[in-house]
Structures are given as structure tokens and as C-alpha cells.
Amino acid sequence: MIKACVIGLGQRGHMLTRDVLLKIDKLEIVSVCDVYEDRIERTLETLKNANQTALGFTDYKEAMAVEGVQAAFIFTDWSTHTEMAVYAMEHGIAVGSEVGCEYSLENCYKLVKTWEKTRTPYMFMENCCWGKDELLATSAARKNMFGTVVHCAGSYSHDLRKEVSYGHVNRHYRFDNYKHRNCDNYPTHEFGPIAKLLDINRGNRILTVSSFASKAAGLEDYIKTREDATDEMKNTKFLQGDIVTTVLTCANGETVTLRLDTTLPRSYSRDFTVRGTKGMYMQDVNMFFFDGDKEYFEPVNFYKESFNNGEKYEADLLPDCWKNITPEEIASGHGGMDFFAYNAFVDALIAGDEMPIDVYDAATWQAISVLSEMSIAQGGMPQAMPDFTNGKWQTRPRKDVCEF
């Protein structure tokens, strides 16, 4: 049984505690922490209803100091993740860190250097690496169905106008990010699965990051329509561009395009796409296209006939976790991805295994945000991605998040 503390009890932290962590029978929550007392009380009541008792704190160091704590789950705002993860690792406490962005390369290096010094288990909790569509396409890539993969794409396309605009009202940190920064501020949902497919940090690496931002108009136009908008909301000029397009180049010759799209009206999409010499996969229509299936000059009939054809490949390609998924796992968050990610952390910690998403992944994936901000400020100038592995990427073996 792993004894854990939970730090950060806002919407995401409370939901993960209630719907995921409490469903993992190898885990016991012994302390919780937030700067807001009402969030602490709410979470303690949730634990009580699940027949668990924990101590509540407003200081994360005190929460980690509770006797027997072996792991810390960090669900706080992005700017505090590295500070808390470093403190935990220095005290021998394993870290499960929620996703986000970083603000400096210095912090990325600090995360890596602390892990290399302490070897305390650390996992970056990118749940989309367990996405059904992403794993379906990755399995196809592992079986060489795409031939040589030459390009991948993805996006974080999610209408967050209300969440961002009412950030201070709801005690959420994104408002300040969109006010002060202009970058791809949330790249890991789309890039994490791509990085795994392309073996980033394990035989491949990112060389450069180039980003371009549109004007910032979506949030201000949205706020004008809100009768309950505060004066702060009405008077804020947001710096964050509505659409940010980022291009990555890789050591093995692939290119990757990422898109941040969160402040204009739209449906949700991660737009996960794989292109190879023998075929492609498109997540938005769950469709494979392989060389010889149809001629390119029949697009209308092809799309009608092939829409959602990914279903017919599931029996052969999906990993067992998706083939055997339970209704409870599906209901745990994001259709099952949350449970798979956090259960994988606990299993690896108990077994003493390597974490499926490690500190080098965390540093590299989050550094995209830092470098995108620098690139945009320089008119799209390519920025060099540091090699956080210090050359070890050339010989590190592949590490998928599950077996295919």
C-alpha cells in the first residue's frame, strides 16, 4: 500500500482524488494540501465518504512531512510544479506531477538534475499518452503499417474562453498566463503521444522549435458579451495569441506541427495525425488510409466509406488495457485515460520499475512552451531544444506506456 499526499485541490485535483486515486486499491491518501481552506474541507469530506482519513494543510512541505508519505501528487498551478517536485525528490518522496507548461529552461534543468542526483521516482502524468486513438495509431506504427513515419501533428483545441476569462473569479491561474504570455502554453496533451511514437529522448530528439502566433482577439470579444464580467476582465488586454502554430524538427528527420487553439469558438480536438510512406491516421475522423486503399481523386466517396474505419483495426491493434477496460475505469476521467496513467504510476512505484513518462520527457515536453515564447518574440525564429539527456538519447531503449 502506497501512502500519498495530494497537493492542489482545485477542480482537477479534487476530481482526480475523487474519481481516480480513491479507485486505486494500492493507494492510501494520508494528507492533502491547498492554499484555500474550503478546498481542503471539501476534499477531506470526499475522503471521509470513501472511508479514508487524512490530514489537511495549507503548506505543501507540512503535507509531505506526514509520517509514512511515500508519494506526492502535484495538481497545483503550473508555476509551482517544479518547485514542489524538486522538494519531494530531495526528501525521497516519489512524484506524480500533473501536466502543464514551464516558464524557464532553468527549471527544466533543475528538474532533471534533481532526479539524476536523487533517483527518486518521478512521472509526468500525461494522460493523453493512454488515449485510445493515440495508442491505436502507435500500435500501427510499431507494426510498420505506416512505413517510414515522416510527419506528425496534433493540437490542443479546446474552447476555454469561459474558464480563462473567469480565472480570478474562480481562483484559477490561467487568466494571468493569457494576460502576460504569448506562447504554446499547453503543448503536452498533443505532443506527449507523438513523442512516444517518434521515440523522442530514446533514439530520437527534438532539434528546433519555431512558433507563430495570431492576434489576440477572442477573449476580449467574448468578455464584451458577458453581463457579469468584472471590471478587471473588461479592462484586461490579453497577450496570448488566439492561434499558436509550432513547428518542431527532429534528429531523425521528422517534422511535427502543434497548434494551441483555446480562445475562439470551436469543438474539442487533439487532431492527432500520423503521416508515413505507406499510410496515415487522422484522429478527428478515426480513419486510417493506406497506400492503395483509394485513389486521391475520390475524396468524397472515400471519406463516406472510410469514416471511423479505425474501429475495424481495434481487435488487432489496441493494447489489452483498452480491450479490457471496465465501466468504472471509463467513468474515472477522460474516458479511462486518467485511471490508466495514475494506475501505471502506482504499479511502477510498487514494482520499482522505470516510470513510463520520465523526467527527461517532462523537461523536453515542457520546454516547448518556453522555446515557443522565445520564438514568437523573435518573429518565429527557430530555437534550439536542449538535450536534457546529455547524449543518452542515442542509446536509451524505447519505452512505450503499455505493451502492444
Image (cartoon, helix red, strand yellow):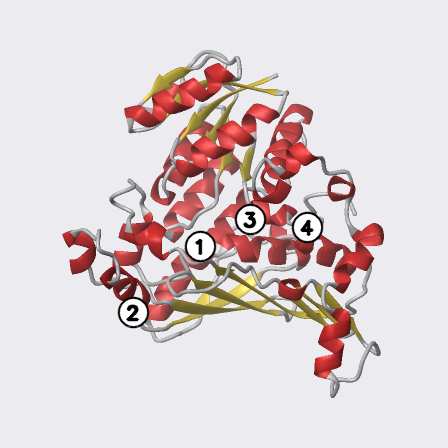
Q: Looking at this view, is 154 or 352 the one in front?
A: 154
| Contact (Cβ within 8 Å) of mark 1 with mark 3 | no
Q: Residue at x 49, y 16 (%)?
A: 49
Q: Under tag 4, what secondary structure?
A: helix
Amino acid found under the numbered disc labelled 3: Asp
Q: Under tag 1, what secondary structure?
A: loop
| Contact (Cβ within 8 Å) of mark 4 with mark 2 | no
| Alpha-carbon span between mark 1 and mark 4 | 20 Å
Q: Nearer the viewer, mark 2 or mark 3?
A: 2
Amino acid found under the numbered disc labelled 2: Ala
Pointer 4 residue: 132
Give the percent coordinates (x, y) of residue 127. 57, 44
Q: Is residue 395 visible?
A: no
Label at residue 186: 1
Q: Is residue 293 visible?
A: yes
Give the percent coordinates (x, y) of residue 287. 72, 66
| Contact (Cβ within 8 Å) of mark 2 with mark 3 | no
Q: Residue at x 75, y 85 (%)?
A: 298
| Nearest to N terminus: mark 2 or mark 3 | 2
Q: Residues within 10 Å of mark 3 (few under 14, many from 20)?
A: many
Pointer 2 residue: 217
Q: Under tag 2, what secondary structure?
A: loop
Pointer 3 residue: 361
| Alpha-carbon span between mark 2 and mark 3 | 33 Å
| Nearest to N terminus: mark 4 or mark 3 | 4
| Nearest to N terminus: mark 1 or mark 4 | 4
Q: Residue at x 51, y 28 (%)?
A: 18
Q: Nearer the viewer, mark 1 or mark 3?
A: 1
| Alpha-carbon span between mark 2 and mark 1 | 19 Å
